[in-house]
Amino acid sequence: MQIAALNPETDLDRYMNALGLKARRASDVLRLTPSDKKVVALKLMADYIRESQADILAANTLDMSKAKNKGISGSFLDRLKLDASRIKGMATGLEEIAALPDPVGSVDEQWTQPNGLQFSKVRVPIGVIGMIYESRPNVTADAGALSLKSGNACILRGGSEGTNSNHAIHRALMAGLGQAGLPIDAIQLIATTDRAAVGHLLGGLNGAVDLIIPRGGKSLIARVQSDARVPVLAHLEGLCHTYIHAGADISKAEAIILNAKLRRTGVCGSTETMLIDNAIAKTALPRLAASLSGKGCELRGDTASQELHSAIKPAADNDFFTEHLAPILNIRIVENIDAALEHIAHYGSGHTDSIVTEDKDAAERFLRDVDSAICMHNTSTQFADGGQFGFGAEIGIATGRLHARGPVGAQHLTTYKYHVEGDGQVRPL
């Protein structure tokens, strides 16, 4: 089936099935592709990203203009925007992924049974990954590169708001694949903004798709989890907390909360709620609130916190369930670590939560008891990022409990099989 002859606007069903068929064929090639060849491709992709900077920026300018004309603003525009620094970071991320150990073929475990049989648990690619994402054009490069590194083909469906940017980046990726002698169908970008294309992808494209990874807002995640006919690895919202414990170093806490909230407010690792122990609230909260409000952060707190600083506005209960993705911080004074843990369990999304304290026992309890994908001590929740974990990049932060949890890098886009070596052994009757 010649995909070039298919128009997704008039023949969507055949077009999408052709994408699936080509992805499956490409995955069969990638599964057996040597590590050094994938490394060459990733480095070439990084080179083409740099060489295509002018084209990518021009495409992004179009996308930004359209988004502004629609009245879109704030964190959404921040996620959509590309500049020279972000393009450089995109290319550097591809090179970092190239430098990582190849997960394919790595051995997780080995053992020998009493009968002499030797067992090995070996990492293998998943196959074909369908990636559905909103606003962030850099996901095009990250998802394509991580899929390639792990020996998977991928079908990408970016949000309509980033169409021009996504296609410009995708062209650079295809150029790198082609020059490396790998199938350009290893990384495919759906060439239509028709929402029905998402439905086809969620249906599995006649068995071609092995895994769906959504990355976006609540409505996108809800639709994917409801409609998908293949397994889903979900990236949910980041209702992140920073808990200022009674044993905190306040200078350290001040630096951490300013970074955790305000470094980039539109990322999922941005802290949305600060909890602070009652024992130190009278002395610590006015200092922290003054620093935050002085940097332009809107503060919304409970009654007790409002009494301690005039900049703190009343918070509704729903605020504590809200991923603001803006310079807005919820504040609640808690009686002790038990109350902090209870609050996080009730309002949190299982993404990233941090405790600031010099009390080793309190830190150990927090890290043990908080049931989130990432639990931190004395550091900013903005480190919830695959690149900061040493993964080169991430395809998302998985908040579920199956297969992968936390930043999803190349090694998490593999499954495993067992190798069993014998020397003539047979099972007794």
Image (tube, rainbow, N blue to C red):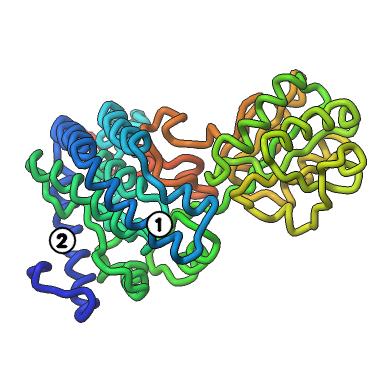
Q: x%, y% of residue 263?
A: 57, 34
Which quadrant of the figure has residue 109? Answer: top left
- Residue at the (15%, 30%) spot, across then down: 36
For residue 55, side relative to residue 195 (left or right):
left
Q: Which mark is residue 167?
A: none
Q: x%, y% of residue 213?
A: 40, 55
Classify 403 as above or below 51.
below
Q: x%, y% of residue 161?
A: 39, 61
Observer-nearest of 282 and 55? 55
Q: Which mark is residue 133?
A: 1
Observer-nearest of 165 and 395? 165
For residue 106, side relative to residue 246 (left or right):
left
Mark 1 belongs to which amino acid? Tyr
Mark 2 belongs to which amino acid? Lys
Q: x%, y% of residue 378?
A: 66, 24
Which secondary structure lies at badge 2?
helix
Question: Marks 1 and 2, how far apart in space?
Answer: 21 Å
